[in-house]
Image (cartoon, grey):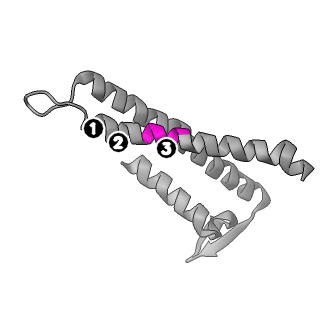
Amino acid sequence: SVLWNKVAFRNFLLGKVWFLFTLLVFILSQCVLNNTERDDEGALSQNVLIISVLCRVFIYLFSGGQQVKFHVLETLKAIRTKDFIWYNCVPMPTYLSLWQHAASLALIVVRILM
């Protein structure tokens, strides 16, 4: 109870607040800004486009950046400790055996390729 109230709760709460904030920025960039008024030719104003790009850069850097940091650190830790599993003759860090981590890495790769 003491550990939860002093350390874990704060980190948990900050993580959830950060997630909600980045979710709101994402919704702003995808839904709200794309449904604003358009000119006679159907194009968005330059200010709306700039704000939309800035929101997307924020999402990629501050949300995706945390995921990239996690995977880089976990991979480096696996290399140092030689903690690998073999999948079709290809060594993979053991942490990728959990589907959540593998899916997170796949999401990062797809985002980078876009």
Q: In this view, does 20 lie above or below 87?
A: above
Position of residue 76 measured from the top left corner of the image (x, y, whole percent): 70, 51
Q: In this rendering, would 19 be left or right of 13?
A: left
Name the kind of residue labelled 1 in the image: Asn
Marks 2/1: CA distance?
6 Å
Name the kind of residue labelled 2 in the image: Gln
Q: Are marks 2 and 1 in contact (CB under 8 Å)?
A: yes
The reply to whether the magenta stretch includes residue 100 is no
**In this figure, which residue is indicated by the disc labeled 2?**
30
Position of residue 39 measured from the top left corner of the image (x, y, whole percent): 13, 27
Marks 2/3: CA distance?
10 Å
Marks 3/1: CA distance?
16 Å
Q: Are marks 3 and 1 in contact (CB under 8 Å)?
A: no
Q: In this rendering, would 20 be left or right of 41?
A: right
**In this figure, which residue is indicated by the disc labeled 3?**
23
Position of residue 11 measured from the top left corner of the image (x, y, whole percent): 74, 43
Residue at the far left: name it. Answer: 40
Q: Is residue 50 above or below residue 6?
A: above
| Residue under the point 84% across and 50% down | 4
State the image quarter where residue 21 is shown: top right
Q: In this view, does 65 lie above or below 54?
A: below
